[in-house]
Image (cartoon, rainbow, N blue to C red):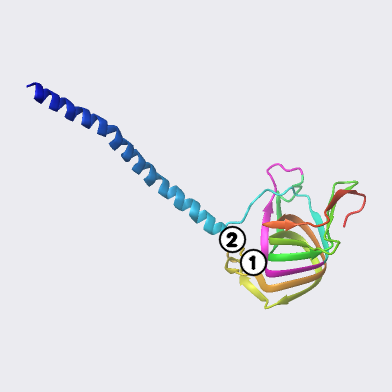
Amino acid sequence: MAENRESGSTSEVSEMAEEPARRGRVRARRAAIMAVPATLVAAGLAVLTAEGALGVQFAISGMPFTVTATELNGTGFEQFGGLDHMAEGSPNAGDTGGQVLVITSAIKNATLTKLCQSVDLGGTNLLITAGSGAEKVSASDLTTDSTELSGDAAFNNIEIGNDASTLTKAGVKGPIGVFSQQADTVRIANLRQTNYATTAGVFKLPGLKLGFNSKGC
């Protein structure tokens, strides 16, 4: 009888010891299963962002700024129409409803000579200059949202009239049904833009100078 009690006790202790381990394995499996959808979603977002299907969005200030350069050279050029939005209640909205119709220009890799950027602050200008020396300003995955653009332009292998959602040259896709154009390369001399937004993956500004000035670009 004593032996049976000891045997039963040993078996019960063994089962009790194994139970937490089993529960731990079940919890681990459940956690792994729950993590799969989140991982797939994150991977999907990374792919979409890399393909340019998801653009980086931010509320614009509504204050235009001027950009000039004596020369811009780029590879992988796209251009299409878009709509920028100001923050709700922005004092710069005026009668626009907080929206600005813009021309989005995207360049995969670009260099700019004698870059100048200025913002009119009313009575003074915030002025930025760079690339006036031997080293040029360079940018990758550059996009600008402009209301005006001028200069002497030349394109290689240009396509005009594409649907913006099918663009391939710069890795950015615009809205479906929107008129667009793209080219392998672009060169613009005496560039002048009125911009509301600029983004870049990498933006290198050799010889950068920033300050206030009575004159803009």
Residue 91 in picture, x, y percent from top left:
76, 43
Residue 56 in picture, x, y percent from top left:
63, 53
Task: Bin the neighbour count of mark 1 within 10 Å (Cα to Cα): few under 14, some 14-19, many 20 and up.
Answer: many
Q: Secondary structure at mark 1?
A: loop
Rendered position, 16 above or below 41: above
Q: Residue furthest bottom?
A: 157
Q: Which residue occupies the foreground of this view, 158 or 94?
A: 158
Residue 127 badge: none
Disc 1 marks a residue whose amino acid type is Ala
Q: Is residue 137 magenta?
A: no
Task: Bin the neighbour count of mark 2 within 10 Å (Cα to Cα): few under 14, some 14-19, many 20 and up.
Answer: some
Residue 178 in picture, x, y percent from top left:
62, 66
Q: Is residue 120 left or right of residue 15?
A: right
Asked if residue 124 shows in the view, the reply is yes
Residue 170 badge: 1
Q: Is residue 79 magenta?
A: yes
Residue 83 in picture, x, y percent from top left:
67, 57
* Residue drawn where x is 54% and y is 58% of the image: 48
User: Magenta segment, which residues?
Assistant: 71-91
- Per the picture, the main secondary structure of the magenta-coloured stretch is strand
Asked if residue 200 shows in the view, the reply is no
Disc 2 marks a residue whose amino acid type is Gly
> Could you tell me which quadrant the C terminus lies in?
bottom right
Residue of label 2 = 52
Q: Is residue 65 left or right of residue 33?
A: right
Q: Is residue 41 left or right of residue 162?
A: left
> Could you tell me which quadrant the N terminus lies in?
top left
Q: Are marks 1 and 2 in contact (CB under 8 Å)?
A: yes
* Residue drawn where x is 68% and y is 54% of the image: 84
Question: Which of the marked residues, 1 or 2, is nearer the chain's N terminus?
Answer: 2
Q: Secondary structure at mark 2?
A: loop
